[in-house]
Image (tube, rainbow, N blue to C red):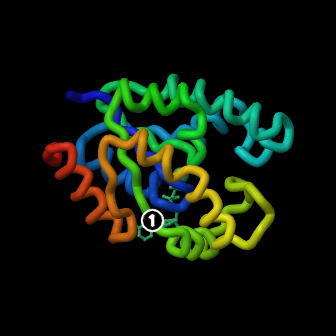
Amino acid sequence: MSSPIFLIGARGCGKTTVGELLAQALGYAFRDTDRHLQQVSGQTVAEIVAAEGWEGFRQRETQALMSVSAPETVVATGGGMVLAEINRRFMQERGRAIWLQASASVLASRLSAYPESAQRPTLTGRPITEEMSEVLRQREEHYQQTAHHIIDAMQPPEQVVAQILDALSLARA
Ligand code: ADP
Ligand code: MG
C-alpha cells in the first residue's frame, strides 16, 4: 500500500520537479537517485561518467536505486535507470512505477532552457532535439514495459501530480 513510487522517464520529463510536489502532497519522503549518487560519491554525474564511463555509472545507479527505496517514499530516478533489467524488475516488483511521458521536442525545449550541462552530460554530442528523439526511441519500450501507469507529463506540474494521485487512487495527506 505504501510501497515506494518510482518516477521514470527521460531527462527533462519532470521527475525531480513533479516528484517533490508529489511527495509533499502525500506526506512522503522524496529521494532522487542522481542526487544520492552525488552525495555518496562526492562527484557529479558528469565526473563519475568521465572517470568510470557510463558502465561504471550504471552500476552505481543500481546501488543508489536500492538504497533510496523505502516505504512512503517518492523516488525520482535517473533517465537511464530502465536500461538495466535488474532495475526494471526491482521497480516493477517493489513499488509503483510511473512513466512521465513527454515528446522529444518538449524535452528538448525544457533542457535547452536549463541545460545544467555539468549535471547532465550529453549522451551523443548531437543537437538536443535529435538526441532526445534517439534516446526515446531506444528507451520507450523499457519505460512502457516497466511502468504500472503512464502519465502525460506535458501538462503543468500540479496537474501531473493530480493525475498520478488519481492513477494510484491516493488522496492528498
Ligand atoms: P528530470 O528530473 O526528469 O530530469 P526536471 O524535474 O529537472 O526533470 O525538469 C526539467 C526542467 O523542466 C526544469 O527546468 C523544470 O522546471 C521543467 N519542468 C518539469 N516539469 C515540467 C512541467 N510539467 N511543465 C513545464 N516545465 C516543467
Ligand atoms: Mg531529475
The residue carrying mark 1 is 102
Q: Quadrant of residue 34?
A: top right
**Residue 2 seen in this snapshot:** yes
Q: Position of residue 110 (x, y in %)?
A: 55, 71
**Does residue 162 lie above or below 31 as drawn?**
below
Ligand 1 has an atom within 8 Å of the beta carbon of the residue at disc 1? yes
Q: Nearer the viewer, residue 117 or 94?
A: 94
Residue type, label 1? Ala
Q: Is residue 129 left or right of residue 110?
A: right
Q: Is residue 134 left or right of residue 106?
A: right
Q: Position of residue 102 (x, y in %)?
A: 45, 65
Residue extending farthest to the right is: 51
Residue at image position (73%, 73%) is: 127
Residue at image position (48%, 33%) is: 88
Residue at image position (42%, 47%) is: 144
Quadrant showing the N terminus: top left
Q: Is residue 64 left or right of residue 52?
A: left
